[in-house]
Image (tube, rainbow, N blue to C red):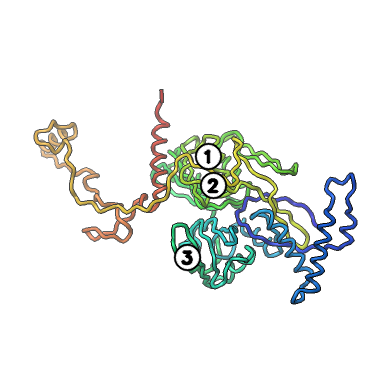
Amino acid sequence: MGFKLQHLSLLTLGIAVGVAISVGGSVFAEKAATPLDPHPLPLEDLRAFSEIFNKIKEDYVEPVDDKVILENAIRGMLSGLDPHSAYLNVDEFSDLQVGTSGEFGGLGIEVTMEDGFVKVVSPIDDTPAMRAGVVAGDLIIRLDETPVKGMTLTAAVAIMRGKVGEPLKLTIIRKGESLPLTITVVRDVIKTKSVKKEMLEPGFAYLRITSFQNRTKEQVYEAVAALKEEHGNEKLKGMVLDLRNNPGGVLGAAVGVSDAFINKGLIVYTQGRAEDSELKFNAKPDDILDGAPLVVLINGGSASASEIVAGALQDQKRALIMGSKSFGKGSVQTIFPMSSNTAVKFTTARYYTPSGRSIQAEGIVPDIAVEPLKLKLSQQSGFQRITEANLTGHLQGESERQQKDEQGNGTTVAPKADEEADPLENELPDGTATEDGKEKKPTLAEKDYVLNEALTLLKGLNILSGREIY
């Protein structure tokens, strides 16, 4: 009925879809059970299927095409296995291939099905959904005025994709909110860049991976090279690898990114019933950070391939994991292209971290738990605390004595840099004016509390790595 071409994927998107097959009673009869047959066909159950098929053809209120009945049957056969097994028709298979390449149309959210509702695994960075305020864990109960309950995920995704430029009203149930929220998102062409970079402070780099696509490994190497060049081609002091709200992607990208930071040892292995589902992936020499400290950020929106990377770096003691527990998707889906450009996607294995942990329904537990907070720093009053230097008759320090000597010689002493600095610099939200009328930028702690904590930890690790511990 088609050829078998495996493509390992760790996509979190759980779209239940289908393919059309041609099945007749004679085919069932030809596969009668024999003592030597290890997988005899359940003929009684197949006869029941045939009877139901005929009943629908004869008695359903409206005529139904054979292809529609069979496609629906296959959809149900696969979707009943788990949320990630699916049947892809021509359009859906094409969408899946485009999604892993980094450009597709829609709202910009990765979704799955939970209790009959569409659950947001993660909004994608810089997309309409994220800008509109959709967050990981949201349950979508209505699309415009259409209830999601009873709808297949395939049908829900078809509505969400729609036409570029058209708005879609999402009715959402969110943890911590007593009433449903209504969020309007305008559809757009979603172009995702999987790797983003920034220098937080001189020598301390920040790398964010939004999803694991075919070229993510190469983009990581390019980004780190650019960050090193920005640092004068000197060794970086440390890096924060941000995998928060990263819903996953292709297995090869996760292995490649893990390998970039690990010199040797196991990265991940998979186990399933089929012989070819048992795979092991080991790291090759060379660490692109040359052993510099690494902190990895995860949260409940970090799933699948993100958990492979976090688990590998944690087990190999290459990084400290920080944030909140991850999503817990520890299964591998294999895509089998069929005839007529359709495909079947179903779960063929579980993956395990180097220490043998299965993440399925468990998630990665961070080494340091930090929940996201919103900080608002208060304006300083200008009151200066009393120190030793303020006490009358205090014993002068070296710098104070030097300053006095220079003044005695007629030398004008310029104020120190820190004395010139505005004490409110970088401590007020955007748009807040100080007495001199200047607007001050928010601090990193105000913009991203968890990232600020990661940077603080990274600085400590960098200091510690330069000391001998006895």
Residue 151 image-quadrant placement? bottom right
**Amino acid type for the residue under numbered disc 1:** Ile
Number of numbered callouts drawn: 3
Residue that numbered label 1 is attached to: 288
Residue found at x 57% / y 65%: 106
Front residue of 419/82: it is 82
Residue 456 image-quadrant placement? top left
Q: How crowded is mark 3: few (under 14 residues within 10 Å), some or many (20 or more)?
A: some
Q: Is residue 113 above or below residue 396?
A: below
Residue that numbered label 2 is attached to: 220
Residue found at x 53% / y 39%: 288
Front residue of 35/207: it is 35
**Amino acid type for the residue under numbered disc 2:** Val
Q: Is residue 222 above or below residue 27?
A: above
The CA span between labels 1 and 2 is 10 Å
Residue that numbered label 3 is attached to: 180
Q: Are marks 3 and 2 in contact (CB under 8 Å)?
A: no
